[in-house]
Amino acid sequence: MMGPTGTDALLLVRPSPQRDLPPGFAYPYEGDRMVAVNDQGRDGDRRRGDGLYSGRVQFDRARFEQDVQRAAQRLESRKTMAPPGRSLRFDRARKVTTVDARTHRASVLQQAREGLVALRNPKGRRSGELFRVNRAGAVAEAHILDRRVPLDLLGSALTDPSDIIPGRSLVITDLQVIADPTRTFDPCQNQGNPDGVWTFKHLVTQIANQSATGVTPLTIARALIELPGAPQQVNGFTVPMRPGLVNSVVGWPKDADGEYILDLFPARLLAIVSRTDLATGGYGGGGGELRFVFGMAEAPCGPAEPSTIILEFRVNKASCASKQGWAQQWLALSDPDLGIGTGSAYNQQLAQMTESVVHAGANPLQSPNRSALGQIRTNDRAYGPWALFEYGLIPTGQPNPGQLRMTTVKQTPDISFKQTPAGAAQLASYIAANEAALLANSHVVPALLPGGAPFLGGEAPTFNNGSFSWTSTLFQTPVNGQALFNFSIATCNGCHTGDTSGTFTHINPRVTGTQSGLSPFMRDPGNPAEDDIERRQRMMADTLNLICPLLPVGAVLPGGFVD
């Protein structure tokens, strides 16, 4: 790359000698962006047909230097190094490696210092060159202003899980946030802003995207409480009828025409949740998920109902840099100097982050809604034995596109696989066939078994059995106990009850003026086996510690394409 001290620069790419080179191609640059480079003597290319492809880019050298300097300062300001023996996980070009945390911190600090030396004291033999990356197969080396520097120069300054404050960056239940009167609304007391960006009304309005679908936000809201009122067919299984929630929630007001008023939908915000730990696996986009947890409220101002509604949005981040950038935004919220409350920098920053994910049109690939919604789940206990249900948007090409339908409950088979001998035999076969993945906690329960038999269920019931587990006395053949436990605790009904000593909800409903409590599985400091938040801290730290490509230049191209 060549360029002056401003932001205009040229990206120069010299491909390996090969036949039939295209006149131009797109080169990965700065996260998800691509830069068009050509060898046609135009748009910045200096000489047609010389084999050196060029493209114009925007590069802020001053900011680049500041980033390197901040990395060095942050490392130098740390009073302690990482504990000996702790490992970090890195993903380089889809190859996962682990390194010792203490060694890595020292290495990155040295790299940052070398980068500053290169920027401030260049050798300068190549006029105008800012940086260069030479590649020979899998080997690459970098030069800044003609001074060789480590390829991992801009690697993270090593975030420790303890840097991530759970109540600020993972599960936010602080009343100064989830009861912010400018962004939330309490239907029990009719207080707050009914159009606030964290209200149930605002979120379902963005999901419905009525201008694109013709579906009203009220249609989305009513589906959540009316679909269970009739039997539903999901993946070949019949989900039994349950009383419609609308018949049991007292006080959802209607207008003069007898229609429910969406502003007063009886749901009170309990928590805003970052799930960057779901960036891989069966849930989440490349950046994981953003969740809003609401508790059903008995209006006006009655007790909290023991049921919740969770709106779960996928954070679509494709590149290493964009995934890490999203995690860094959450880490920034852990800054204790960032004030919390209405009008505070914290609330403003969080609102900007959430709106970037939930706004109508955030995912153009999900037609017709173009919403980033992944799924909506309900924990329903007030209106029958506890069960968890899952809902998704109906895509274009199917009846009632843009509306909600009940869908399979992920990771959770139909209850018949626990209750009948034939089902238990099939479950035992599944456990045995997937034992390695189950022991590694990397399994994804399929909708269908080999051979095409339906497997995932349309509900996760427990029959109000607080000790529910997928362990079955009907197994005719022995199964690996640890594999079975890992399977069971990953199901919705196992995770919410017997396998975690839970009481059906992990974020508990609240009454006005009180903060939601968390289940022991979520928050039990000092007990890693029963503290999921500690696990989420570690996984977010791993994301923050990913070593993305050194400079804003793509590192992954077809083999041998670029030297």
Image (cartoon, helix red, strand yellow):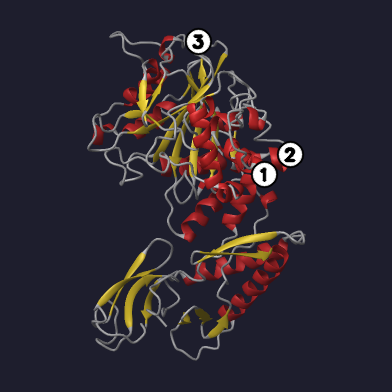
Q: Please state if 540 lies on the left or on the right of 2 as rendered.
A: right
Task: Please identify the quadrant where the N terminus is shown.
Answer: bottom left
Residue 383 is labelled as none
Q: CA distance from mark 3 to mark 1?
A: 37 Å
Q: CA distance from mark 2 to mark 3?
A: 37 Å
Residue 300 is labelled as 3
Which mark is in front, 3 or 1? 1
Q: Which residue is mark 1?
A: 534
CB-based contact (under 8 Å), mark 2 and mark 1: yes
Q: CA distance from mark 2 to mark 1?
A: 8 Å
Along the line of sight, which residue is nearer the eye, 298 or 112? 298
**Residue at point 52%, 82% (across, down):** 143
Vertical placement of residue 357 versus 58, above or below: above
Count of numbered labels shown in the rendering: 3
Q: Which residue is mark 2?
A: 525
State the SS at label 3: loop
Residue type indicated by callout 2: Pro
